[in-house]
Each structure stands twice: as C-alpha cells, then as structure tokens.
Amino acid sequence: MKATTHRYHLIIMATLVSWGCFFMTSCENDPKRIDALTRNVVMKEEATKVEAWLSQDGIMKAKLTSPLMLRVAADTPYVEFPNTLHVDFYDSTSVINSWLDAHYAKYFEAMGKVYLKDSVVVITNKGDTLRSPDLWWDQNTKMFYTDKYAIYHGIGKAITGGKGLEATQDLNSVIFHYPTGTVEVSSSGFPAN
C-alpha cells in the first residue's frame, strides 16, 4: 500500500511540475502591456480663459478668473488652477470688498477649501494687504489661515507672523501666531484707527 501511495504522489508531483513549466513558458511579460493594464488613470477636464461666479442664497459672493482650470477626478476630486488665479470677493450689497491673487490654487470641492501658493496676496478696498507664500481659504467660514509666515500691512500697521495666522476674508480680524511688527497707538495706548 505504501509503494502505491508513494507512486501516486510522484505522479501527481510530476504532473504539477509539468503544468507549471507549461504555464511559465506560455506566459509573456510584455512591460508595455502590463503597464497599460495596471497604470492608474486620472481623468482630467481642461478649461481655458475661465470666469466663474460664486453665489449663495442668490447673493453674489465671488468672481474667479484664471487662464487655465483643470478638474481632476481622483480619489479626492479637486479643481486646479496651475497658471495664476484672481478672485474678487463681494459684500452683501454686491460691491467688491477684497480681492486675491495667487500663482497657483487647488480647490477641494468636497471640503469647500482652497489651497493657494506662490505669491499669495489679499487686498481689501480699505488698502489692507496680506501676503504669504501659501494660504488656505475656507469657503464655509470665509476665513484665511496658514502655518507659514505672513505679512500684513494696514493703515498704521505692519505685522509679520512667523508661524502663521487666521484672518477673516475681509481682513477685519487678523490673528497672528508669534507676531512681530509695529502698530501706531493713540495716547490712550490702544491702536489708532
């Protein structure tokens, strides 16, 4: 019985080895074909000379212009503006109260947030100016924030934040982390208006 079982195992083993050799010699590993089957394809839509309007509850909130816009359908969909971006922000009476310029922007639609970088500048109609190498804008809270340095100039103020800031969209409230700078004060010791 043992000899028959041993012989049976040898026959099965020989059959498996021969089938394995057959499959190994019949497989072809063409790198181009493997790449075509396994590469990650990202769908992109492209638009040029973009002018987009943002409104909420029928009230104009912002106007965006950019020479190029890419809508990318990735795991986290986003809209990219790789060649500059300009945004005019409107108050409740549809008057521009501030505007923004950046060399690059990426809008994450699901989060309602925009990442801005490369020479980001925000200017209000009062002349207040905020500059930073990168900045986030939260569409829902209408707040700017960054953990990088930022420079703010206003009437009688020049403040630099070494570790970031949080600011309202209209720059009426600017809170710096680790600020340095100068602020004109009145005789009462409070900032001059």
Image: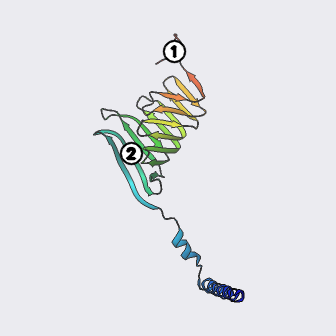
Q: Is residue 85 left or right of residue 92?
A: right
Q: Position of residue 152 (x, y in %)?
A: 52, 31
Q: Amino acid at mark 2?
A: Leu
Residue at point 60%, 84% (across, down): 23
Q: Position of residue 164 (x, y in %)?
A: 56, 34
> In which quadrant of the rendered image does the N terminus lie?
bottom right
- Residue found farthest to the top: 188
Task: List the residue tagged with mark 1.
Answer: 190
Q: CA distance from mark 2 to mark 1?
A: 38 Å
Q: Quadrant of residue 14?
A: bottom right
Q: Position of residue 167 (x, y in %)?
A: 48, 32
Q: Is residue 168 left or right of residue 54?
A: right
Residue at point 53%, 69% (across, down): 38
Q: Quadrant of residue 159?
A: top right
State how many labels appear: 2
Q: Amino acid at mark 1?
A: Phe
Q: Quadrant of residue 93?
A: top left
Task: List the residue tagged with mark 2.
Answer: 64
Q: Earlier in the sequence, mark 2 or mark 1?
A: 2
Q: Is residue 4 above or below residue 122?
A: below
- Give the colour scheme shown: rainbow
- Residue found farthest to the front: 1
Q: Is residue 79 above or below residue 33?
A: above
Q: Is residue 55 above or below residue 35?
A: above
Instruction: Please tell me which residue lies in front, 75 or 99.
Output: 75
* Element under disc 2: strand
Residue at point 48%, 36% (across, down): 144
